[in-house]
Image (cartoon, rainbow, N blue to C red):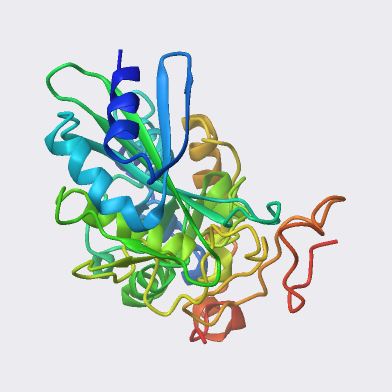
Amino acid sequence: MGLETKLKSVPWLATKAEFFINWARKYSLFQYPFVTACCGMEFMSAACSHYDIARFGAEFPRFTPRQADFLLVVGTISHKQAPILRTVYEQMCAPKWVVAFGACASTGGFYDNYATVQGCDKVIPVDVYIPGCPPRPEMVLDGLMKLMDKIQGEKLDEHEVSPKYRMLP
Amino acid sequence: MSKEHLDKIVAQFPEAVVETHSLCGDHTALVRRDKWLEVMSFVRDELGLDHFIDLTAVDYLGREQGKDRFEVVVHLRSSQSGERLRLKARVPENNPAIDTLCGLWQGANWFERECHEMYGIKFKGHPDLRPLLLYPEFKGYPLRKDYPIDRRQPRVALLAPETGRSPRPGDETPHGHDPGFKADK
């Protein structure tokens, strides 16, 4: 079957707490999709059975930020919406990670005007940027795997001490 | 077909119609803004153009002398015959006001709110001219041609300054640039 057959002779493991906790975190990301625009279609595609984001442990979209640790900013963020996005981010429990999904969330895309925030990293800290207008589901999964690599490499207290994750202005 | 509409409007309001033109089956009348409500009432009740499609404005910044800067544009349609008509009125920069159409079409309400927040045109008699799409603390009228193309009005303290595209030749006029803005090099 699985691990248990291999562990029969040695029924214990020695590992580092940091490695083990990060390993557990990276395979159990609960997403909060903050969907504002057409990128949402690609998010749905990545989340549904054809591409099946659940294979990477990010199965569960939670529609309250308080239960999520992985914020997907999917689509254009306008200045009118920026306070909402920041509130959602602040409602999430640490440790938390943010992925900017698509060109608009990463840079504002081609909306260079009075209405649009030029990338959601102006409002909240962002860990991974997924380019594309919109990105294909493969790119979404690639971005997710990059985030998992990042989580695996984090220090245990990273979200407490890193200035990036400190209180927002 | 709806050329007849134009003729009827001109016959009814010879002094109110500034000019008319027809192109590819679409008909337009430019009317004086002080007769705006009268003409609209006539085309709705007498010509049967009862379907209010759209209301917006155009900013002709730097227009030649004698012509007002803004034009309010309304598109109407007859729900019986399907004929369409476009009506416009010029609105000056120093007193950008025109009568509201809310009394004739309730649907004009949100169009006029949007037109007000984007172009700064006041609709006299409108029940509630609050911003529709913009946030309440937004200053200025962003679809006016002299609103600086890179002026931003963030509502939260930003983590990093916003940088848009670099200025390009031709940006100097007529949009202008926000002097407080640092372009991304």
Q: Position of residue B3 (x, y in %)?
A: 35, 18
Q: Is residue A32 visible?
A: no
Q: Residue at x 22, y 70 (%)?
A: B128
Relative to B52, A92 lies left or right: right
Q: Is residue A113 visible?
A: yes
Of residues A60 and B125, the one drawn nearer to the viewer in this rendering: B125
Q: How many marks?
A: 0
Query: Dividing the picture into quarters, in which one does residue B137 lie?
Result: bottom left
Relative to B19, B82 lies left or right: left
Relative to B139, B83 lies left or right: left
Q: Position of residue B150 (x, y in %)?
A: 67, 64
Q: Position of residue B12 (x, y in %)?
A: 26, 36
Of residues A69 and B10, the one drawn nearer to the viewer in this rendering: B10
Q: Is residue A25 above or below residue A122?
A: above
Q: Residue at x 31, y 41 (%)?
A: B13
Of residues B109 and B28, the one drawn nearer to the viewer in this rendering: B28
Of residues B46 and B54, the one drawn nearer to the viewer in this rendering: B46
Q: Is residue A121 above or below residue B137?
A: above
Q: Position of residue A114 (x, y in %)?
A: 56, 62
Q: Quadrant of the N terminus of chain A?
A: top left
Q: Is residue A18 above or below residue B14?
A: below
Relative to B47, B70 lies left or right: right
Q: Residue at x 46, y 75 (%)?
A: B138
